[in-house]
Amino acid sequence: MEVFIGRQPIFNMHEQIVAYELLYRNKNVNNFPLVDSDAATVDVIVNSFLSIGIDEVTNGRPCFVNFTSNLLYSSLLDYLDPTKIVIEILEDVPLTNELVTRVRDLKKRGFKIALDDFVLDEKVEVYDDLFVYIDYIKVDFLLSTLLERTEIESKVKSQFPHIKLLAEKVETRNQFEVAKHAGYTLFQGYFFEQPQIIQSTDIPANTLQYFQIISLLKDEEPNINDLAGNIEREISLTYKLLQLINQSNKRARSKVRSIKQAILLFGLTELRKLIYLLAMREVNNQVESDTFNELMRASLFRAKACERVAKINYKENFSEYFLIGLFSLIDTILKRPMHTILQQLPFSEEIIQTISGAQTEMAPYLQFGTALYKLDWNKLDELMEQLDLAHETVVQIYFEVDEWVKEAFV
């Protein structure tokens, strides 16, 4: 499944890129398609943070993302890294005491806040309270009048000098010079650069599987084993879950060796938020592809076959064998280099080396899972001797694993 992100640079006074605004795109066309604003923001966040990787999208710089009123008050912000994102409050969000309280709470958690397409309105009474917590005010140089801009500039300079003024839709050198003279320190617009389209590939999700997981998570104390069993059938979710763990401070303390361990590291509360967010996105973004389905079937088959043989051979870390099979085709699925993907996942060195093709102790198990899926009996005969497996056992494993994979696609 192809995914797209629009990215427009934000420059400082020296015309150096200091941040990016991330924009919704649903195809390789450089304009905003007609789509629900909530869905657009969710798609931008999922694609940039989980499908592509935020550091790859922004080169380590902060990203400005539009937030509607609904999403501003939602749990979406509860697991986003405040050092990587600037919350851009859209111009149609009501400026109320409730907003002041919400912004104050977000600032305490480390987020930076921007007001988008801002114009002073004499009917609003909370500016003085709100501006204390605002980091950026974005002013539209294409649509705003000189008087409107002067009023904003005067208020910020005299009362709230900590706020940085950002001139957007700057389309000429003259507008750039006027904005600099008026006290703006950040700039964005076609004068500098049109939005770039970043294209990547995401793993299609089984929406039904998401809702089965949601039903399990409704219990106050869900069964972790049942959860792990359902999640390990959903490659898209497993990949995103491991990425989030890798981005968190939990990575330094522990390498992930099983889906169950990943759930416990991530936490049930955070898992609920992630599942709801992804389910919301997938309902509006379901794309079927025979090629992707075949790759995911092969990945699941390899994973379960590796795990099954590891159990037969009394490997205590049999869950790690599941992971090597599950992610053995991830480079083909995402159409990206394997080493780039593995850098974003919290795996042990042996798992990384095995998936990368090294001849580790785990490698014959991955070779077995691959050969069994293809029913390559010449290779299987060689591996059966190496792994001490009888022919009858291999046939039994095949039918057990094949049935398990079919259940994942029901």
Image (tube, rainbow, N blue to C red):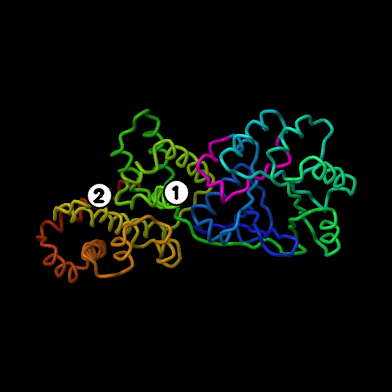
Q: Is residue 163 above or below residue 52?
A: above
- At 65% from the left and 40% from the top, the residue drawn is 68
Disc 1 element:
loop
- Name the side, left or right, on which 323 lies relative to 289: left
Which image quadrant is residue 107 in?
A: top right
Q: Nearer the viewer, residue 87 or 201?
A: 87
Q: Is residue 101 above or below residue 31?
A: above
- Name the side, left or right, on which 240 lies relative to 66: left
Residue situated furthest right in the rendering: 147
Q: Residue 28: x and y, percent?
A: 62, 61
Q: Nearer the viewer, residue 368 or 260?
A: 260
Residue 80 magenta-drawn?
A: yes
Q: Residue 72: x and y, percent?
A: 61, 38
- At 26% from the left and 48% from the top, the residue drawn is 404
Alpha-carbon span between mark 1 and mark 2:
36 Å
Q: Which residue is denoted by mark 1 in the rendering?
A: 248
Q: Which numbered circle lies on residue 406?
A: none
**Alpha-carbon neighbours of circle 1 within 10 Å: few (<14), some, or many (≥20)?**
some
What span is in magenta? 74-93
Q: Nearer the viewer, residue 46 or 299?
A: 46
- Name the side, left or right, on which 206 lies relative to 194: left
- At 30% from the left and 59% from the top, the residue drawn is 324
Depth check, mark 1 against mark 2: the one in front is 1
Q: Which residue is denoted by mark 2 in the rendering?
A: 403
